[in-house]
Every structure is written in structure tokens, then in C-alpha cells.
Amino acid sequence: MKPWNYLASFSIPLFAAIGLLWGGIWAWLTVAVVFVGVPAMDAIVGCDTDKVDDSSIEPVRGSSRFYSWILYIHLPVQLGLILLFGWEWTRQLAPWWVQAGWVLSVALSTGGIGITVAHELIHRKTKMERWIGRLILMTVLYMHFAIEHVRGHHKNVGTKEDAATAAQGTNVYAFILYTIPAQWLSAWRLELQRLKKLGIPTWSWRNEMLSFLMIQSLWLIALVSIFGWGFLGVYCVIAFLSFGLLEVVNYIEHYGLERNALPSGRLETVQEHHSWNSDHRVSRMLLFELSRHSDHHMAADRQYQTLRSKEHSPQLPSGYPGMVLLALCPPVWFWMMNPRIVLSRDAAKPI
């Protein structure tokens, strides 16, 4: 898609800001757009495979920095939205149902859009881009994701060693309770392994886990100094909802898909049938092609605008927002997805 299509991603923080400023029923605007409007538009507009030819990937990647600048701008947008939320939260006593709408709306923006942008940037090759991604993760207190996702998840996806892969029959709530602490511990193990190889002690400024804890602590201190201690609790709720939403998406992306052991005893390489995919056009624009997840796992350094629709990847019946709603209702999720797992396994078997 052309770069301006991805400007749609700014609509979510914009709607959240409108809800904060206008209050009342507008506080729920973002929730309605994400969980009613987007799934409806996905159903109406439908899917678009618009395959990217391999020979055109480099020209597309190098044709415009606009694709990347759209990502960069989301850092000040995310910071601005959080500061606006803090200002509105502390200056007036809104009804509880308005406050609930604010919290959910901001979390949908910081978790749904912000973390998606961060996910794209932590895979980039330049230090500047990786740090923009990390700073976005800082705003939701999840900086360790930059370690565990890149060095852990991409290596172990589809195996029992991957805390971000949900086994068939696991409901999303049990998955979230397990995966959040498990990924934090995994990030610590990975970082300690890296330090050991380099001969660097644990208590060092080069320990990224310690650096991340320090940066996030300073961020919290800054928020408390601006908005007071009373703001800290609700901010932590927004952070939890944000990275909780990330983990719901992780659940959707790999639920029940496993890598098989080869006759040699080694695991098969990551292939297109190890991720669930969706080509629903509206969701793709909002989430920077995240739902073309198979291609991302097969080539993690491929930039979002060049991700391809994989012919043999298992397909989701809706875009990510619709699938989040389904995941939150486990009986419906199992009824819809478990038969698809069987079909995906059959399709992946060699002929």
C-alpha cells in the first residue's frame, strides 16, 4: 500500500484525544471504533492479497522515507496522549463511566498502535530506530519486550520454550497470566547470557535489563512529579492493559501452531504455517501489516510495507480487532479456531 494509507494509524490516538477533551459519551469513541467500526469495515472492505513481487521489494523499501517517518512520529504522539490523559484525569472529577472510557481508549491507542509501532522499530538495524521503539515501550513499562521478542520469541516460536506461543486449548486469560512474567524472566536469562559471553558483570550499565528498569523508573518519577501520586495507580492500569493487549495479539498470532521435530531431532525452520495471518485491508492499514505475520517471522528485518501475503499461511476469519473480541470469549474462540488448527496441520503436511 502507498504510505499515506498508514496515516490511518493516527486516527486511534486522535479519537482517544477527542474522548479526553469532549468527555461524556465521546470517552467511548475509540472503543466503538476499534471493536465495532474496524471489524465492520474489515467485513465490508474485505481482504486484499496484493502480492509484493520479490524484485520490487528493494525499490519499495527505498522509494520513500515517509514509511519510516510515520513510525517515528508516533513517539511524540504517544507521549502527548499520555500527558493529555494525565492533565484531564487530574484537573476534573469525571463520572466513573467516563473515566473507564478514557482508560480503555488510551490503552487501545498506547497498546494497539503504540506497541505495534515499537514492534516494527525494535527489529530495525539502526540504533536510533531501535531506541525510538524502546522509548515507546517505556511509556507502557514493557521495555524488556525489545529483548525477549527479538532474541527469544523469534528463535523459539512454535515451541514449548516460547512463552509467547499459546498451546491449543489454552484460554487467553490463562495465557496472559503465564506469558507476562515468563517473558520478563526470559528477557533476564537472555540478557545474562549475552553479558556472560562478553565477560561483563551483571551489575553493569551495559546490562540492558537494569538500564530499562532505571529508564522506566525515571519515567514514572517524572509522571508523579507532574500529576501527583494519585495518578500513578491509573497509569499503571493503562500500562497493564496496553501490554495485556499485546499479549492477546501474541495469543492470536500463534495459537495452537507448533513446529515439528525432524528425523534428525532438530526442529523444522520457521515457515509460513507457523503464524496466523489476516489480509483484511483496514486492519492492515491501522497495524502496519502486522497481520502478515508469517512473512515477518520468515524475514524479521523485512520492513512493514514490503511484507507479503503468504499463499499457504493459515488465515484468520477477521482482522485483529475482531479476533481480540473472539479471544476474550474462550468458548467461541475454541469453537472457531480449533478446527482451523486441524486444517492448517493437514495443509502443512508434505505430499
Image (tube, rainbow, N blue to C red):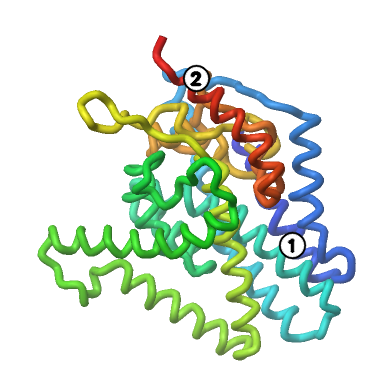
Residue at (80%, 63%) from the top-left corner?
A: 18
Expressed as whole percent of the image width and height from the top left, the position of residue 311 reads 53, 19
Q: Identify which amino acid the numbered label 1 is placed on.
A: Ala
Q: Is residue 1 visible?
A: no
Image quarter in which the C terminus is found: top left
Q: Residue furthest top?
A: 351
The image position of residue 339, as x and y in percent, is 61, 29
Instruction: Residue 51: give its label.
Output: none
- The quarter of the displayed image where residue 154 is located: top left
Query: On the image, which quarter does residue 146 sit in?
Result: bottom left
Residue annotated with mark 1: 16
Q: Which residue is mark 2?
A: 346
Answer yes or no: do the residues labelled 1 and 2 have beta carbons within 8 Å?
no
What amino acid does circle 2 point to? Asp
Q: Label 1 to label 2, Cα distance in Å?
A: 43 Å
Task: Check disc 2 and report its element: helix, strand or loop.
Answer: helix
Residue at left 22%, top 64%? 192
Say which label, 1 or 2, has the lower sequence index.
1
Q: Position of residue 309 (x, y in %)?
A: 54, 25
